[in-house]
Image: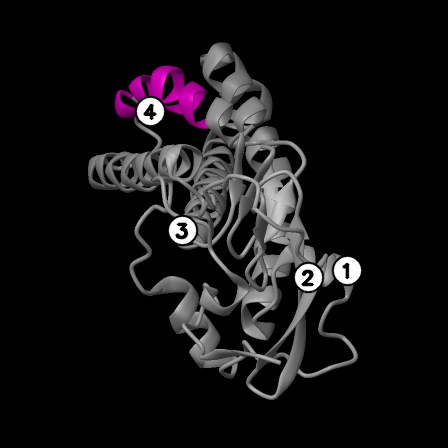
């Protein structure tokens, strides 16, 4: 939705604003440059989120012997159950989930995002945060500019005279303002909810399943530490390469590189 508003603004409104006398020349050029930078940043992060491996765990050959359906692990004093995935033939590491849409096990699975057409997981979560934040910022920036321009022009000449001086411009100003307003509300809710989850060191999947509601969260490093870890995570190389069958004792947690001991 915000993409539509941004494209309409850049292709139709910006050329008209550039030749408009309502705003000073310094304001016009400055706004266009800043908005273009924020909007392009959101577009780039969108593509990064969509085309980055979210942390897909490679499938293995069926084991030569039957393994238990689940195992108990001790992570920072908390008992965590890891389950056998019959589709991927692996024990899912802690916080990994098999996505029913992508049909893959994803490390530190957050959710499957239909907007980008990809899972959000261990390797692209940071870019997802940057994507939704920059998209919200571009929507708010566009909305505030349009509101300022409309109020200034109406105050100078009145509503009817301002509208009939350039009907196409004002139609698109109102249209993009409506799109930006809806996008700002929806994205504001999403950014607020995601920020809450980051502060608590929870994934969306864990929050829905209430995984750590009644027990301690062994992955939390405090509010500030959780934000640092989410925005500046360790480098996780893609795992999509052939490898030998992995026993449960070899599994490490994917997020905080915590020491995991079989119990």
Proximity of marks 4 and 1: CB atoms separated by less than 8 Å: no
Nearest-to-viewer mark from 3 and 4: 3
Relative to 95, is 25 above or below?
Answer: above
Residue 142, given in percent of the width and then of the height, sits at 45, 38
**Residue assigned mark 3:** 123
Residue 221, given in percent of the width and then of the height, sits at 49, 82
Proximity of marks 2 and 1: CB atoms separated by less than 8 Å: yes
Residue 28, given in percent of the width and then of the height, sits at 27, 35
Relative to 186, is 82 above or below?
Answer: below
Numbered disc 4: secondary structure = helix
**Residue assigned mark 4:** 17
Which residue occupies 63% across, 38% down?
87
Compared across the picture, whether 167 is left or right of 197 comes to left
Q: Residues within 10 Å of mark 1 (few under 14, many from 20)?
A: few
**Main SS of the magenta segment?**
helix
Give the CA separation, mark 3 to mark 4.
41 Å
Q: Residues in magenta?
A: 6-19
Between discs 1 and 3, the one toward the N terminus = 3
**Residue assigned mark 2:** 206
């Amino acid at each position: 939705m915000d993409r539509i508003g941004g494209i309409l603004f850049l292709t139709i409104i910006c050329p008209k604003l550039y030749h408009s006398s309502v705003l000073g020349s310094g304001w016009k050029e400055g706004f266009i440059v800043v908005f273009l930078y924020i909007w392009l940043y959101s577009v780039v992060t969108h593509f990064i989120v969509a085309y980055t491996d979210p942390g897909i765990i490679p499938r293995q050959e069926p084991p030569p012997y039957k393994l238990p359906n689940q195992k108990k692990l001790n992570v920072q004093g908390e008992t965590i159950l890891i389950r056998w995935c019959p589709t991927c033939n692996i024990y899912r590491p802690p916080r990994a989930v098999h996505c029913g849409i992508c049909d893959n096990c994803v490390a530190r699975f957050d959710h499957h995002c239909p907007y980008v057409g990809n899972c959000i997981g261990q390797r692209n979560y940071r870019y997802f945060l940057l994507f939704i934040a920059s998209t919200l910022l571009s929507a708010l920036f566009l909305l505030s500019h349009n509101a300022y321009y409309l109020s200034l022009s109406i105050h100078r000449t009145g509503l009817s005279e301002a509208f009939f001086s350039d009907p196409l411009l004002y139609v698109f100003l109102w249209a993009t303002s409506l799109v930006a307003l809806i996008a700002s509300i929806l994205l504001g809710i999403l950014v607020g909810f995601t920020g809450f989850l980051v502060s608590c060191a929870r994934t969306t999947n864990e929050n829905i399943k209430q995984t750590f509601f009644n027990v301690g969260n062994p992955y939390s490093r405090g509010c500030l530490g959780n934000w640092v870890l989410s925005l500046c995570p360790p480098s996780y190389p893609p795992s999509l390469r052939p490898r030998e069958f992995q026993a449960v004792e070899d599994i490490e947690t994917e997020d905080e590189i915590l020491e995991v001991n079989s119990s």
